[in-house]
Image (spheres, helix red, strand yellow):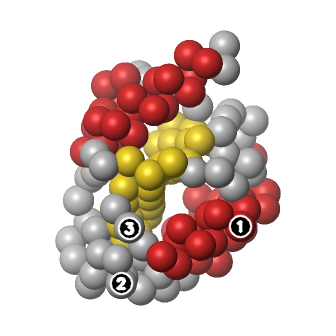
Amino acid sequence: MLFLQLTLHPEAIVFKKSSWIERVQAGFPGAEIMEADNYSEVFLYQQILKWLVQSTEPLVIHIDSLDTEASMGNMLRFVQDVLQKKNPVLVTIKGKHAGVEKYLRAFTKYQVVETEEEAVAVLKSQMTNSK
């Protein structure tokens, strides 16, 4: 399983590991995980996209919007590329961001969650239902 964490910050800040990632690692040992935020360089997005496309594993995306008005930077183009090349089995979004939600609505289903715990519970439920 591939897990992609995308975070929208209001400004460039020190990148911190997401608590969602910690929960995924605890619940899915051996999971392949990548993280990026709206201030990540294009090169990182390119490498993540390459990783996603080359893998045959299913993809789960979690978007954490820490600011409803955060600039998406290069992330919008990246999300577009991901959704065109690899159909995720689950997309969750914590927080609100009109730009992200409008874009996701156009290309895939997603679920709004209040907490990382809820996102992981949705993920576990999805995995159970798909078996």
**Is 37 on the left or on the right of 26, as rendered?**
right
On the image, numbered disc 1 is attached to which residue? Answer: 106
Which disc is residue 69 wearing?
A: 2
The answer to which of marks 3 and 2 sits earlier in the sequence is 2
Q: Do the residues bearing badges 3 and 2 touch, measured as CB atoms within 8 Å?
A: no
Give percent across and percent down for residue 43.
Answer: 56, 74
Residue drawn at 66 percent across, 45 percent down: 88
Q: Is residue 77 visible?
A: yes
Dot 3, how many residues are within 10 Å of its Cα: few (below 14), some (14-19), or many (20+)?
Answer: some
Quadrant for the C terminus in the image = top right
Q: Give the spatial CA distance, label 1 vs label 2.
A: 20 Å
**Is 91 on the left or on the right of 56, as rendered?**
left
Give percent across and percent down for residue 33.
Answer: 47, 43
The answer to which of marks 3 and 1 sits earlier in the sequence is 3
Dot 2, how many residues are within 10 Å of its Cα: few (below 14), some (14-19), or many (20+)?
Answer: some
Whether 76 is drawn above or below 28: the answer is below
Which disc is residue 43 wearing?
A: none
**Quadrant housing residue 117:** top left
Q: Amino acid at mark 2?
A: Glu
Q: Amino acid at mark 1?
A: Ala
The answer to which of marks 1 and 2 sits earlier in the sequence is 2
Q: Secondary structure under badge 3?
A: loop
**Quadrant housing residue 119:** top left
On the image, numbered disc 3 is attached to which residue? Answer: 96
Whether 34 is drawn above or below 79: the answer is above
Q: Secondary structure under badge 2?
A: loop
Give percent across and percent down for residue 123.
Answer: 48, 31
Q: Nearer the viewer, residue 45 or 104?
A: 104
Residue drawn at 57 percent across, 51 percent down: 110
